Image: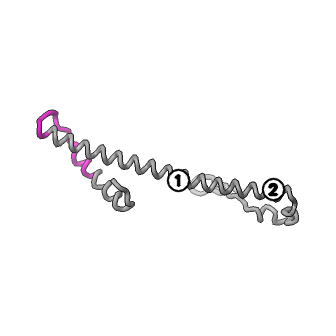
Amino acid sequence: MWSKRKNIKVFRMKNINQLFRSNTKLMDEPEVQELIDYCRELEGKVLERNIDDTYDKEQFYVQAFKDIYESIEQTLKDEEEAIRFKETQQVDFKECILNLKKYMLVINRLYGLEL
């Protein structure tokens, strides 16, 4: 069965009891029992894989968040040194960077990330 929710097609898998609802005697057959065990094993692997994928994505986003924050810190430090030593022409990006840094600190506190 396919259902549409927000223009995404989602397949809803039937459980084993739903598949054999009309003929429960088939579940006693050794071949069918073997298939049922195999299906349960695959369901476990799929669930483990979904958990691993979520964890990997989360780690990737946290690392990207940390990299952006460190880049902001380095850019602000470089800007301060350029002003102090009068090395380069100033670029007016400081307000944007400071606002981004404040936002990232709020997200850091909200989600308990360790920057």
Across and down, in percent, residue 33 comes to 82, 59
Checking the image for residue 54, the label placed there is: 1
Indicate whether 34 appears above or below 83. below
Q: Which mark is residue 28?
A: none
The residue lying at 31 percent from left, 48 percent from top is 69
Image: magenta residue range? 83-99
Q: Is residue 106 magenta?
A: no
Q: Secondary structure at mark 1?
A: helix
Which residue bears the numbered disc 2?
A: 34
Quadrant location, the N terminus: bottom right
Looking at the picture, how far across and down is residue 47, in whole percent?
Answer: 62, 56
Q: Image check: 77 left or right of 38? A: left
Q: Earlier in the sequence, mark 1 or mark 2?
A: 2
Q: Residues within 10 Å of mark 1 (few under 14, many from 20)?
A: few
Front-lying residue, 49 or 95: 49
Residue 86 appears left or right of 68:
left
The spot of residue 73 in percent (x, y) is 26, 46
